[in-house]
Amino acid sequence: MKRAIVIVIDSMGIGAMPDAEEFNDDLSVNTLCNIAIKQNGLDIPNFEKMGLGNIKDIKGVNKTNTPTADFGILKMKSKGKDTTTGHWELMGLVLENPFKTYVKFDEKIINEFIFETKCGGILGNYPASGTKIIEDLNEQHQKTKYPIIYTSADSVFQIASDINLIPIETLYEWCKTARKILDANKAGISRVIARPYKIINDKPTRIGSLRHDYSVKPPKDTVLNTLEKNGKKVLGIGKIYDIFTGSGVTEKILTKGNTDGLNQTLHAIKTSKCDLIFTNLVDTDMLYGHRRDSLGYKKAIEEIDSYLPDFINAMTNDDILIITADHGCDPTYKGSDHTRECVPYLMYKHNYEGKNIGIKNSFTYVSETIKKHLLQ
């Protein structure tokens, strides 16, 4: 049985796209390389063996003359720098029209949301860091029970509430309502995100394991649908199911964070009969990229590296392992938003001599590799 294992290290970009300035970034953004510089090098010997250091000069990561994986760079063809756009393109769907972003949501949409949910009112409605806005507005939230609504430079409509005040089921229903209203108004928003939190040690603390994304459905088939139509099974680990609204994903495992995602992926490699194991590791983006924590990001990459030998040992001779990313989120850059970057590409299989694939003009190189491996 042939299997493809695809691991997306969320936001681990490797250098600015030529058009980065059109997305309010500059050409200095480089998530992976800038973290290595800021933190005096990365300790990732297993990525080094694969050839990650051959892609770019990454402090602490040597080049190798005997890479065990194909290595290279993928450019994003779609116009965007968000999770949905990146993942869709990895699976073969290039967006011709980018998702819309907002500084403030239209009053019509907010009024419809208040009317439909009967929530009484809302707080926020401006771009913000999720951790900061719940700290800033929590006191008002406790008094009014109004949901906290915010966005960012990405195409997101985020709703936060204290789940000891507002039941998690109510928060999810609010998000479903928002999704319907946004779609009906053709707002062009990629994701509605439930952001539950609790007060822990007197501090509002987000509960990542209860986060839920309500994405817009892909407008066309991806390679996931192609695999399903050909009788193949797709296992989505982490937020994969949400990103694709379940389209083409035949089985799913939700995760509590990177360590859980890595363990679930290892278990799947050992036991799953699914043809494609597709994992998103979100902490690099959510906990460290957006919060501009380069040390946390470094440690997360090193943790992923430590799992690679176990992944490889659990693979069969017919498996391939692809490791890539979906966009950038350079923690050394200003602000707290994603950065418009190319992403690294590594493809490992047993008894294989890796090669330099160079620079590919689209993330769809991943979907093409999957199809070639599983359908030909």
Image: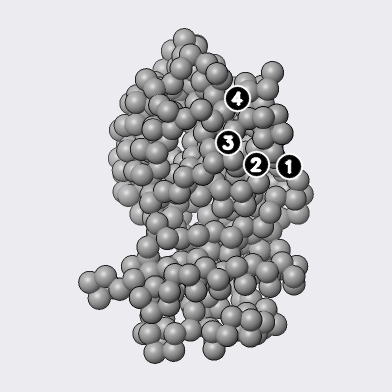
Q: Is residue 262 above or below residue 334?
A: above
User: Which-is-in-front pick, marks 2 and 1?
Assistant: 2
Asked if marks 2 and 3 touch (Cβ < 8 Å), the reply is yes
**C-alpha distance separating marks 2 and 3:** 7 Å
User: Would you name the residue on which mark 1 appears?
Assistant: 221
Q: Position of residue 211 (x, y in %)?
A: 46, 60
Q: Which mark is residue 358?
A: 4
Residue at the spot 52% in from the left edge and 68% down from the top edge: 172
- Give the residue at mark 3: 234
Of labels 4 and 3, the one closer to you = 3
Task: For the residues labelled 2 and 1, say whether their Cβ atoms are less than 8 Å apart.
Answer: yes
| Residue at 38%, 79% in the rendered image | 165
Instruction: Give the residue type at disc 1.
Output: Asp
Element assignment for label 1: loop
Q: Quadrant of residue 250?
A: top right
Q: Amino acid at mark 3?
A: Val
Sequence-wise first label, 2 or 1 = 1
